Image: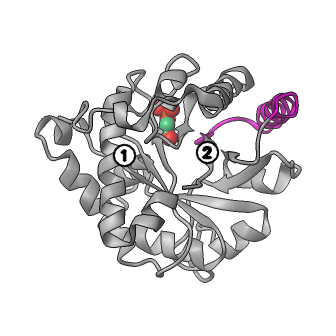
Amino acid sequence: MTRPTIIAGNWKQNPSRGEGESLYRGVCEGLMARAVPPSLSVILLPPFPFLASLPPHPRVELGAQDVAVEPWGAYTGEVGAPTLREFGASHALVGHSERRTHLAESDAQIARKAKAALAAGLVPILCIGETEEERKSGVTDEVLDRQVVRVLEELPENGPLVIAYEPVWAIGAGVNATPAMAAAAHAFIRERLATLWSKERAQATPILYGGSVTAENAPELMREPEIGGVLVGGASLRPESFLAIVDAALAAAGGGKKQANSRSRAGGRS
Ligand code: PGA
């Protein structure tokens, strides 16, 4: 089973141009100073204009935070996948919970966005996750299932996909899911992928955890075999904290992962 470990930084609607350029420089310099193996991908997801202004760097891939449903046309304010690709993006987030909540994006729309991304050669990073209320009422698995199935139905037989499990209650909250909780959700998602696709394709699909990932909790999260990387919001806005998370991934790759069979499958799922 070979799948890359992914450390992705979602800058959201931050920072200013000067701050962003200096953040990017800091991250690139930090990566150059480390022995980063090809099996570790660093993806930064800045606001759209940065895709054009940040110089390409061998250790960093750039992604968009969203993508239009249609490639071209009279859709004022939207940015289509072919344009994102031309301006240097290799990935696109789809279905981030902030867009689901504030912009009422539906699973059907998100599915079309993932499809549009793939058609233009972008790797979709599909964000899914339950709200606090859903977790408390014990329907986490049903929610994840619905969010995954609706998108997979639309996607071609082949084509890359990254999934980011981001419990809504953990995003920007300063409270992260425990590693066991995240690992249980990841295992459930991978099982569903195996049923809907194939075991091989499910194994090859990176599943990231997102939601209040910090330099402090990253080592513990990254040690879980099911956690194939992280999607980082707040802590991606400073080179030091983001690079410390990269270091946690490097340490886990260098033998710091727990043994897969030591994990309790039911773990923290509630
Ligand atoms: P956070 O954001 O790390 O600030 O919780 C994560 C995300 O929204 O992707």
Q: Is residue 79 visible?
A: yes
Q: Position of residue 154 (x, y in %)?
A: 40, 78
Camera-side residue: 154 or 220?
220
Kindly identify the residue that appears in the image at 38 percent across and 22 percent down.
175
Q: Earlier in the sequence, mark 2 or mark 1?
A: 2
Q: CB of residue at label 2: within 8 Å of ligand 1?
A: no
Residue where numbered disc 1 is placed: 186
Answer with the quarter of the image where residue 10 lies. Answer: top right
Camera-side residue: 73 or 266?
266
In magenta segment, residue 34: yes
Kindly identify the residue that appears in the image at 52 percent across and 60 percent down.
204
Q: CA distance from mark 2 to mark 1?
A: 15 Å
Which amino acid lies under the numbered mark 1 shown in the image of this protein? His
Q: Position of residue 19 (x, y in %)?
A: 78, 31
Location of the C terminus (image quadrant) = top left
Q: Would you call the spot at circle 1 few (<14 residues within 10 Å), some (14-19), or many (20 or more)?
A: many
Residue where numbered disc 2 is placed: 6
Q: CB of residue at label 1: within 8 Å of ligand 1?
A: no
Q: Which residues are magenta?
A: 9-35
